[in-house]
Image (spheres, rainbow, N blue to C red):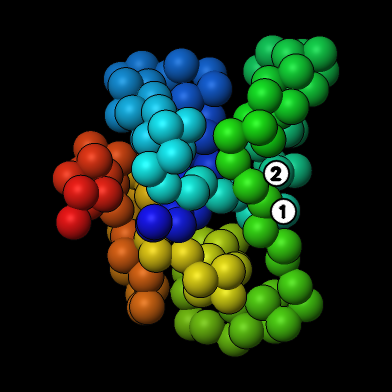
Amino acid sequence: MKKVLLDTNIVLDFVLKRKPFYENAQAIFFEIVKGNMEGYITASMATDIFYLLQKTNGKKFAKDTFADLLVIVDVLTVYREDVYIAQQWEWDDFEDALQTQVAIHGNMDAIVTRNITDYKKAQHLDIVQPADFIQYLRK
């Protein structure tokens, strides 16, 4: 079974039903719920997601939505070692480097993101766009 890290944009596309991205995100979450794959976020992404949900729709919405999200996805720990390794990489965006390192440390198969160019330096992982994900999952 494939294990994938869902980028923040994919999670927000799903929980906020952001058009035109919602359908692809919904299909990905449906595959997780069906048990066809395992979906993850990182602990550092959790704070970003909660903050953005609260900012856009209020604290109650953020708490309720995040509780529902945690029934579907699991959370990868961000270790000191991950932070140390990621900060040594020559990446433009430290957050993307850290997410990649945590995914590698967590034995993920892929990162699903709409921003694949942000992960162009990623090695040892597949970087998959949501529109291509169902086909990727069937490999």
- Residue 105 lies, with reference to residue 99, above or below; the image says below
Label 2: which secondary element = helix
- Mark number for residue 90? none
Counting from the top left corner in percent of width and height, residue 2 is at: 39, 57
Q: Amino acid at mark 2?
A: Ala
Q: Is residue 68 left or right of residue 1?
A: right
**Residue sitting nearer the eye, 2 or 83:** 2
Residue found at x 39% / y 56%? 1
Q: Where, quadrant-wise, is the C terminus in this rendering? A: bottom left
CB under 8 Å between discs 2 and 1: yes
Label 1: which secondary element = helix
Mark pair 2, 1: CA separation = 5 Å
Residue found at x 38% / y 43%? 36
Q: Amino acid at mark 1?
A: Ala
Which residue is denoted by mark 2 in the rendering?
46
Which residue is denoted by mark 1 in the rendering?
43
Mark 1 closeness class: few <14, some 14–19, many ≥20 residues within 10 Å: some
| Residue 87 appears in the picture as rendered | no
Using the rendered view, name the quadrant where residue 122 is placed. Answer: bottom left
